[in-house]
Amino acid sequence: MMPSIPQLLIVLAIVVLIFGAKRLRNLGGDLGGAVKGFKEAVKEDETEVDDAEAGKLENVSERVADEVKDKKEV
């Protein structure tokens, strides 16, 4: 069962009274920075994986080219 809008507003008011607006603003900024850092790390990891896969493909193509060259020489 979902809480209604008035219930959410009451909970929000209580949270603001307990923690204060400044502390909540800082908490929101910290949370946003953490999410941004996480997204950047995921994107960086995907780039590394793509680069590694590209490197593997280059190695495979070089080996195939060497094998073809060796067979032609024989």
Image (cartoon, rainbow, N blue to C red):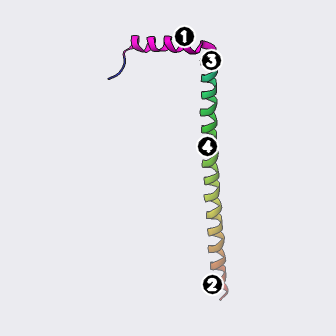
The mark nearer the N terminus, 2 or 1, is 1
* Badge 2 amino acid: Lys
Please tell me whether mark 2 or mark 1 is closer to you in this view.
1
The mark nearer the N terminus, 1 or 4, is 1
Taking the magenta stretch, the answer to whether it contains residue 41 is no
Residue drawn at x 49%, y 14% is: 12
| Label 4–label 3 contact, CB within 8 A | no
Q: Nearer the viewer, residue 62 or 44?
A: 44
Circle 1: element type: helix
Circle 4: element type: helix
Chain part drawn in magenta? 4-24
Q: Which mark is residue 17?
A: 1
Please tell me whether mark 1 or mark 4 is closer to you in this view.
1
Magenta-highlighted stretch: main secondary structure? Answer: helix
Residue matched to label 3: 23
The mark nearer the N terminus, 4 or 2, is 4
The mark nearer the N terminus, 1 or 3, is 1
What is the quadrant of residue 32 in the picture?
top right
Taking the image as shown, residue 4 lies to the left or right of residue 74, namely: left
Residue matched to label 2: 71
Residue 35 lies, with reference to residue 68, above or below; the image says above
Separation (CA) of disc 1 from disc 4: 38 Å
The mark nearer the N terminus, 4 or 3, is 3
Crowd class of label 4 (few under 14; some 14 to 19; many from 20; radius 10 Å): few
Taking the magenta stretch, the answer to whether it contains residue 9 is yes
